[in-house]
Image (cartoon, rainbow, N blue to C red):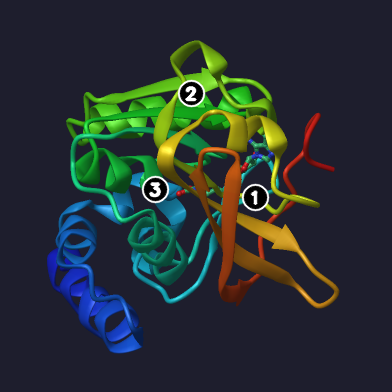
Amino acid sequence: MTDFAARRADMVERQLRARGIEDERVLAAMGEVPREAFVPERLQRRAYADSALPIGAEQTISQPWVVAAICQALALRGDERVLEVGTGSGYSAAVLARLAAEVIGIERHESLARGAAAALAGVGVDNVRLLVGDGSRGYPERAPYGAIAVHASAPAPPPALIAQLAEGGRLVVPIAAAAGDDLTLLRRYGDRVESEVIAPCRFVPLIGEEGF
Ligand code: SAM
């Protein structure tokens, strides 16, 4: 029998803490969410691999460090409403659900959204609402958001998402660059937007009106 709890604890120490993730809330959340529940059954033994894994529809569940880096950059305190674009397997939504009050996830593939909803229910997460559609336009109906996480690479920071940020809100989005993508943090203060590259990374493209 696979000892998933031991692998998860090992992932937190070796892949996350040892590589610069220091937000204890993020480390605790990733030490609790059972990643094996969000990967296809045939790949469960590799659930804690230091890599992305296929989840169907030619998409992937992101590498654990990438999920942690995004969550850390969002600096969540626990009372925020978070918009997640590109929910995929539902794993990152489950982590965000432990860090914030409420998560609205948008996934463009209906089959993945269905799987994510089942996996989230299976592990008892009840503060994530899943929508199917183009998340590059955001979801103005529930704006403003204290934080927005985008898990697919955009040609530029989507203006619709910036407009849906609360004052002081944070948006993390991979931006396509000449060699790979730049995981980028944007902060909105009134009409001013501050931007900072967190790390180089590689994501699937954001497909949609404000994507590719
Ligand atoms: N965070 C996810 C997880 O934990 O499994 C992995 C996300 S995967 C790297 C990126 C996802 O973004 C894919 O599932 C893809 O279908 C989705 N995607 C791409 N463009 C999108 C868009 N415009 N709106 C919503 N989802 C989109």
Tell me whether the residue at label 1 lies in contact with that at label 3, contact meaning CB atoms closer than 8 angstroms: no
Q: Position of residue 39 (x, y in %)?
A: 42, 50
Q: Within 8 Å of ligand 1, the CB of disc 3?
A: yes
Give the crowd class for mark 3: few <14, some 14-19, many >=20 residues within 10 Å: many
Q: Earlier in the sequence, mark 1 or mark 3?
A: 3
Residue under the image location 20 percent in, 47 percent down = 77
Q: Which residue is mark 2?
A: 114
Task: State the SS at label 3.
Answer: helix
Q: Earlier in the sequence, mark 2 or mark 3?
A: 3
Residue type at mark 3? Ser
Q: So how many labels did they put on this image?
A: 3
Tell me whether the residue at label 1 lies in contact with that at label 2, contact meaning CB atoms closer than 8 angstroms: no
Task: State the SS at label 2.
Answer: helix
Q: Which residue is mark 3?
A: 92
Q: Give the CA separation, mark 2 to mark 3.
A: 15 Å
User: If the image is split into quadrants, where does the C terminus sit?
Assistant: top right
Residue under the image location 65 percent in, 21 percent down = 133
- In the rendered view, does 106 fall on the left or right side of 42? right
Task: State the SS at label 1.
Answer: loop
Q: Within 8 Å of ligand 1, the CB of disc 1?
A: yes
